[in-house]
Image (spheres, coloured by chain):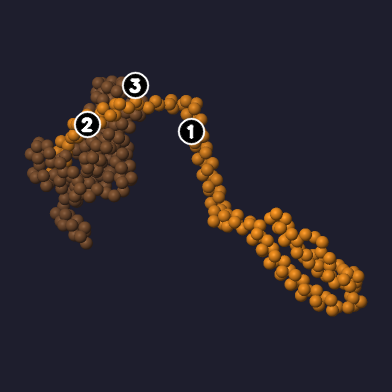
Amino acid sequence: MDKLNLLKQFKNVMPDPVWSARSRASILAHEPKAVLPRFAPWGIFMNALQSGSAIALTGALLFLLIGGFSIARFLETAGGLDPYSLRAEAEAIDIQIQLAQLAYDAPAAEVKAGELDPKETPSFRTTSTNVEVTTTTPKDEATSTPVNTEPTIVDALEALVE
Amino acid sequence: MEDHEVSLIAQAVEGDAEAFGLLYDAYHPQIYRFIYLKTGRREDAEDLTHHVFLHAWEHIRGYVDRGHPFSSWLYRMARNAVIDHYRVRRSPVRLDDLDTEALAAPEVLEAAMDTALAFRELRETLRELKPEHQDIIILRFVEELSLKESARVLGKSEGAVKLLQHRAVNALRKKFEPGAAELKTRHSHG
């Protein structure tokens, strides 16, 4: 192939002598860098440190990825811990519980005390924190509204905000 | 390697600037040529050649003579420099922008060519090949390195280099087949 023979002519391409001289002088003005011995203790320590940290970081990253960690979800959760928003949520829950209590207490008040075994009469007493089942006596039925002295979620959150 | 060169390398490794200067004189034309044929621009070839030799001088103390030619160390750095150059630059050089002066100037070259156009066509076609095909063509047919030396430079076995050379020559031949230029023009316009 003639073209391949022609390629040999590229060997006549030479750099500009002025540039060559300037480049040579510029290069030799530098000092060669010192080389650390390959098996120096410091070199071994640094290599081990680099390898170890690389493996540890890779492991941590894999653990987070496989575990389904999501930075968006994490930030969303962190943002949701605002005491003011928690308080608003708690107030909303409170209202629902009170409404449920009203619906339950209304038919219970119509039941005659003598028709039921006092020891087995269940009644729901609701507080703002939980709903507990207690066995009430006829005496308790007479006073239909229980006295609630426990702190509510709202109280706790107010204390937290303060 | 000749004894004189081995001695120069040993002195350079010890930090002898004069010895490295002589190595620079001996090898910088071929490294420049290698880079020039791959980049197609004189400015890029000068910058990268300077970078290669500066890097070589700065790291000469770490050079270990394993019996390979000193040039294979330089060629490897030159290949990496060109790869980095294109990685950063990303946009390929337009063939129209190629510097024609560096090749057209030497009278001996003009005389050896049928026409300057043929020379230009060959150079442009070479640059259309894959980088590794360019490497093997330049090393084997321009610099006339042996298979063994080329294998050292490219980090491949001699068998792999033979295969690569075969493919590179075929690729170059296809570029020059009748109708290839027409196809290329039609493809570029279409």
| Element assignment for label 1 | helix
Give the numbered dot on residue B14: 3
- Residue B186: tell me if it is visible: yes
| The image quarter in which residue A134 lies | bottom right
- Residue A120: tell me if it is visible: no
Tell which of A160 and B75 is nearer to you.
A160
Q: Residue at x 79, y 65 (%)?
A: A132
How much space separates mark 1 and mark 3, taking CA atoms? Answer: 26 Å
The reply, left or right, for residue A62 in relation to residue B176 is right
Chain hosting mark 2? A
| Element assignment for label 2 | helix
Chain hosting mark 1? A
Q: Which chain is brown?
A: B
Chain hosting mark 3? B
Q: Amino acid at mark 2?
A: Ser
Tell which of B65 and A132 is nearer to you.
A132
Q: Amino acid at mark 1?
A: Asn
How much space separates mark 3 and mark 2, taking CA atoms? Answer: 24 Å
Location of residue A13 in the rendering, given as x and y in whole percent from the top left corner:
17, 37
| The image quarter in which residue A139 lies | bottom right
The correct choice, above or below, for A89 with respect to A27 in the image is below
Q: Amino acid at mark 3?
A: Glu
Image quadrant where one finds the C terminus of chain B: bottom left
Give the numbered dot on residue A47: 1
Q: Are marks 2 and 1 in contact (CB under 8 Å)?
A: no
Q: Which chain is orange?
A: A
Read off the residue under disc 2: A20
> Can you tell which of label 2 and label 1 is closer to the viewer?
2
Q: Residues within 10 Å of mark 3 (few under 14, many from 20)?
A: some
The correct choice, above or below, for B56 with respect to B129 in the image is above
Q: Residue at x 27, y 37 (%)?
A: B47
